[in-house]
Amino acid sequence: MTSTPDPDCGCRHTLTNEAGEEFTIIHQMPKALSHYYPLPDLATGVIPLYRGKFQTDGKRYRGVISLSLDPRPTVDVSGVRNVTIEDIMALDGSRGSAKWVDRPTVAVDVKEVPKPPKTPHLRWSRKAGTERRSWDPAPIDVGSGPVDEITFFVLNGWLAFDGLNTCYDGHDRPGRVQIGLGEWELRIEPRGDHAPKVVRDHSRGRGQSAVTHVGRIRRLDGVDFEPLDAVGVLEVVETLVSFALGRVTSVALPVGMLNGKPVWTRWSALRAVDRPLGSTPWLDASRAAAQLAELFQCGHAASLDALKWEVFQRTLGYYFSANFEATVTMKVMLPVSGLLMLSFAYFVETLPPGDPARLSKKAWKALTAEEAIRLLLDRMAADTAVPGHLAHLVGVQSKLATAANPAPDGLSCVVKMRNDVAHPERARLARWDTYEWAEAGFVAMGFFDAAMLWWLDYQGRYIPRSAKHRSAGDAVDVPWGSGTS
């Protein structure tokens, strides 16, 4: 048994040529994915989920639940109830805790996934004896499996001019990714109600989160599965999309379907999402769908190796901090820390015993930071030269030149500048200006981009961070060949 192929949409377009002859074009592409919850309007960014009764903290409320995308994606719960004298007395002397506070749990009074309401607004009376409250709750699971597929939204995604086409109400939309990930089939495509560039420009122009893609996951063999069996794969996809964008994004509102009927959902945006600002680190819009397809496949394979995936996730902390809204000095310092982590993990833990390049923990710690990172970059066949078009960094190179090293390369410049941050000395406090720090950051982050891709055994193309031209179509092959990681 295998998963059922998606049928073609069958849309027909009748055109007339210059000779006045009519001819018909029939779309041979699948219909766009549909999601149980309607695509939110770009301007409002609110998805109504539920209207009715629910319980929290032992109290019953009547209210609404919705997913709000602005200012950050979060599930909003608002409810009203009648207040008792015991409730009023319990408020006397109550104080907020300065310690960790658990997010409230909310249980809805339904046995199956309810139909979404038309509006998220809550009507209530201000008469005495009523209380209105709002919560940001823990994820709310409704219903149960088994399911035959899960559809989901992706927030603040990427722009791709390539990829497979889908049809949305007669409009063909490029950018679909459809691949196998082990025993799973993943399909992700841009939302179809607006052209992808319109969605991207709206989000970037306002810094506002938006649903940009709709996805689906199901088993390749077509067998039903429990929703929690697929959640781990969705988390891997979410992590890899965030890496490709250089900022944290999220999968939201997964809905498990069985024979076309919703039987399970999780009302949640799983992560604290960054605003959709800035350019992507290494994606090329002219081939981003192909890049993401390969990243999903090699990243999913890496997630099956406990050490490889744990190191990748830890290093992402440095990566996100350096890439998104960091100062120019941190864009030099943080990549060095991340590269050192990858170097240790590879030469001390990953290489098998007996490999001549494997190092003991003691031997690795005896290396300088530059030596440890150089081992890694050499293994990747990375070009460490100072790019000639980065004039300010060329000036740094001249200032750092010595008789023993008259032309320090990009790595030497980055590490020495990083040391000025990590080990501040009074005489060196104003040694470098903003432009020098910025260009050193381009090179440092370029090393970091490449090392993260190499760690996942990515073999595709990318746009180097320090390249002279970084527009659509400027991607180049990664410097390493197969079998180098």
Image (cartoon, rainbow, N blue to C red):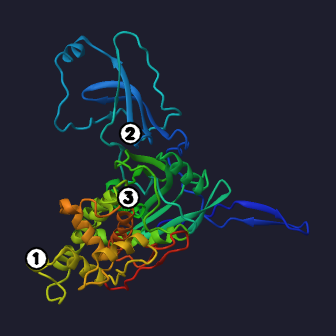
Contact, mark 2 vs mark 1 (Cβ under 8 Å): no
Between disc 2 and disc 3, whose residue precedes? 2
For residue 384, above or below residue 279: below
How far from the left and from the top, in percent, is residue 147?
Answer: 40, 54
As helix, strand or loop, the secondary structure at mark 1 comes to helix
- Identify the residue under disc 1: 361
Q: Nearer the viewer, residue 125 or 33?
A: 125
How far from the left and from the top, in percent, is residue 30?
Answer: 60, 63
As helix, strand or loop, the secondary structure at mark 2 comes to strand
Between disc 2 and disc 1, whose residue precedes? 2
Q: CA distance from mark 2 to mark 3?
A: 18 Å
Between disc 3 and disc 1, whose residue precedes? 3
The residue at the far left in this view is 362
For residue 187, above or below residue 383: above
Residue 190 in sight here? yes
Marker disc for residue 238: 3
- Identify the residue under disc 2: 75
Please state which amino acid type lies under the numbered disc 3. Glu
Residue 305 in sight here? no
Left or right position of 108 against 204: left
Please state which amino acid type lies under the numbered disc 1. Lys
For residue 48, above or below residue 380: above
Q: Nearer the viewer, residue 305 or 3?
A: 305
For residue 184, above or below residue 255: below
Please state which amino acid type lies under the numbered disc 2. Val
